[in-house]
Image (cartoon, rainbow, N blue to C red):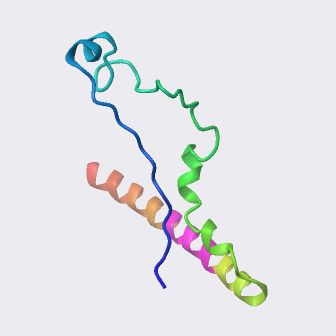
Amino acid sequence: MENYCGEIEFEFKILTGHDARLAPVGKGQNERNEDPYLPKPSVGRGFLQKFTLFNNVYEGLTGIYLKIFRTIKIAFYVLSAIILIYMVFYIINIIH
């Protein structure tokens, strides 16, 4: 059974040079948010969202497996914090 990863739908237009000069978009220009206008997402774009890497694993876990997973998740975050702190102090000692 293949894993279903989702879908992407996109649309593009081929414009004449004249039409492209009338509405410049892209790098160094206005934001590309026309036709249709898409409001900026209000969920899932924050800094802390990157720390939710294990959230999709919760689905389907029950009982003892959920407790074990939560313990492993907490241990991973604690170990990551310890390594980060160690690296900061190590770099500070190298600089001095």
Q: Is residue 34 left or right of residue 69?
A: left
The residue sitting at the bottom extreme is 64
Q: Position of residue 37 (x, y in %)?
A: 53, 26
Q: Splitting the image into 4 quarters, where does residue 29 fall?
A: top left
* Vertical arrangement, residue 37 with respect to residue 23, above or below: below
23 or 85: which is nearer to us? Answer: 23
Q: Is residue 73 left or right of residue 64?
A: left
Q: Is residue 78 left or right of residue 1?
A: right
The residue sitting at the left extreme is 17
Q: Splitting the image into 4 quarters, where does residue 40 fall?
A: top right
The residue sitting at the right extreme is 63
37 or 77: which is nearer to us? Answer: 37
* Vertical arrangement, residue 67 with respect to residue 52, above or below: below
Number of on-image labels: 0
14 magenta-colored:
no
The residue located at (27%, 55%) in the rendering is 94
Q: Splitting the image into 4 quarters, where does residue 45 fall?
A: top right
Q: Which residues are magenta?
A: 72-81
